[in-house]
Structures are given as C-alpha cells and as structure tokens.
Amino acid sequence: MYPNHFHMPYAYPYVTNPYQAPYARYPYSSYYGGYQTYHDVRQPVRGQATWTEGGTVTQCGIPWSANLYMTVAVGQNSPYKCGDTLKVKNLANGREVLVTVVDQVAGYGKNKVNLHRKAFETLGANVDFGVINVEISTGVELEEEKWGKYLLEVVQSAYSNYDVTDYSRVSKTKQNANRMKETYKYVLRSPQETITVEGTVIYNPNTDRIISMDFKEV
C-alpha cells in the first residue's frame, strides 16, 4: 500500500529545479512554446478522442511512456503544444484524466485528440468502440506554475496505481528572501477509491533550487 505521508528534505543537489528532474528529457523550447496560446484555449472544447498504442518516436521528443502512459497526441495545427497538460473528460461517464502532449499528427483539429490506450481505458472507455466523445481543457494554471507540474510527476510516480484527475494550487508564500513555499492539491482515483494528496515544495526563488518537498494525504 502507499504511505499517507512522505518527505524529501534538503533535496539539493540531487534535485535542483524542475528543468533537471524530470524536465531534462523535455525540450525547453517545446515546454514554453505554447505560452502565447494559453488565453486562446482556456475554455473547454467538446470533441472526440481515439486511442493508440504509441510508438518509439514522437514529434515532441517525449516518449509515450511519460507520466505512466497518461499521454496524448494532438493535431499539428492544434493550439495545444508539446509538453502541455490537458484534462480530458469522458462525457459518457464523467471520468477525467490529466495527460501530457507527446506527439502531433496531421489532420486533427483542436477538438480531436489521440490518447494512449492506457489513458483511454482510464476514462472507462471500451477500446472496441475506438472513439468517444470528450471535453478537452488545458491545465492553464499548472502550465504557468512550473512547480505544480513538477510535483504532479512526483505524485504520479509515487501513486502509480492511481490516476491524477484534477489539481489546484492551495497557496504560495514568500518565507524570506531565499525561501518560497508553494502548496498544491491533487485528486487521485483508483477503481476502489478517490483520494486527495497535498504536495508542498520549498525552494530558493533566486536559484530555483529545491530545499525540501512534502506530500501527504488529506
């Protein structure tokens, strides 16, 4: 089973900032390339989702296995960019999942996405149907708050049998000139239960080095 609390004190130098772990595998320009489009895609879009087993090569340079296969491909002309976090909701049953954009395909509009099979099944969808009606929205706050996305990946790894379906920032506090504290809340779901995990990171805002991290079930 999973611990209801874990702590990572004094993580530096093993973890210095969200671009070295885990973002070292993501191109810097890809992650920030979509910043100017955030205001264009704030509103949820209704459309369709298909599924794929993924491949070894992606247009984004991010593997389909990222985020425990909670990944998705979007259209080449989509407002969603490589590394973006999307929330996809199955309109048939209300189930939601957060996925990372790892690939781009030709001919897909902004209202159609291609989920990895595991993400498709997480939505409670039958792969035999091949396509489902969904609502797509961006993790705008999470994309703008780099520490929130960093903590998201840690939570996903720590609770590998759960799917992260939602998040929110709880607080951001400047403790002193060299210490900033941010706290985020994540909603996780398994077939048996839904739990909430609160993640806190304290870091040096001048160097982006992590001082400590805490996670607890609330």
Image (tube, rainbow, N blue to C red):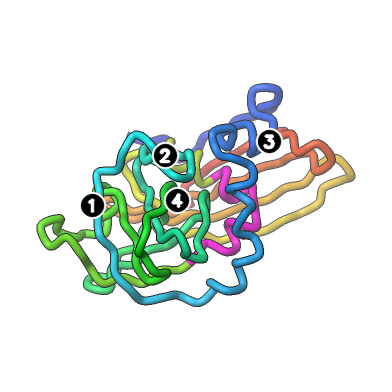
Which residue is disc 4 drawn over? Answer: 100
Q: CA distance from mark 1 to mark 2?
A: 22 Å
Q: Is residue 111 above or below residue 195?
A: below
Which residue is disc 3 drawn over? Answer: 17
Residue 66 is tagged as 2
Q: Which structural element holds mark 4?
A: strand
Tag nearer the camera, 3 or 2? 2
Q: Which structural element holds mark 1?
A: loop
Q: Position of residue 6 (x, y in %)?
A: 52, 34
Which residue is disc 1 drawn over? Answer: 191
Q: Which residues are magenta?
A: 138-151
Earlier-in-chain disc, 3 versus 2: 3
Q: Which structural element holds mark 3?
A: loop
Q: Is residue 132 above or below residue 124?
A: below
Q: Are marks 3 and 2 in contact (CB under 8 Å)?
A: no
Q: Are marks 4 and 1 in contact (CB under 8 Å)?
A: no
Q: Verify whether residue 141 appears in magenta.
A: yes
Tag nearer the camera, 4 or 1? 4
Q: CA distance from mark 3 to mark 2?
A: 19 Å
Q: Are marks 3 and 4 in contact (CB under 8 Å)?
A: no
Quarter of the rendering occupied by the N terminus: top left
Q: Residue at x 26, y 53 (%)?
A: 122
Q: CA distance from mark 1 to mark 3?
A: 33 Å
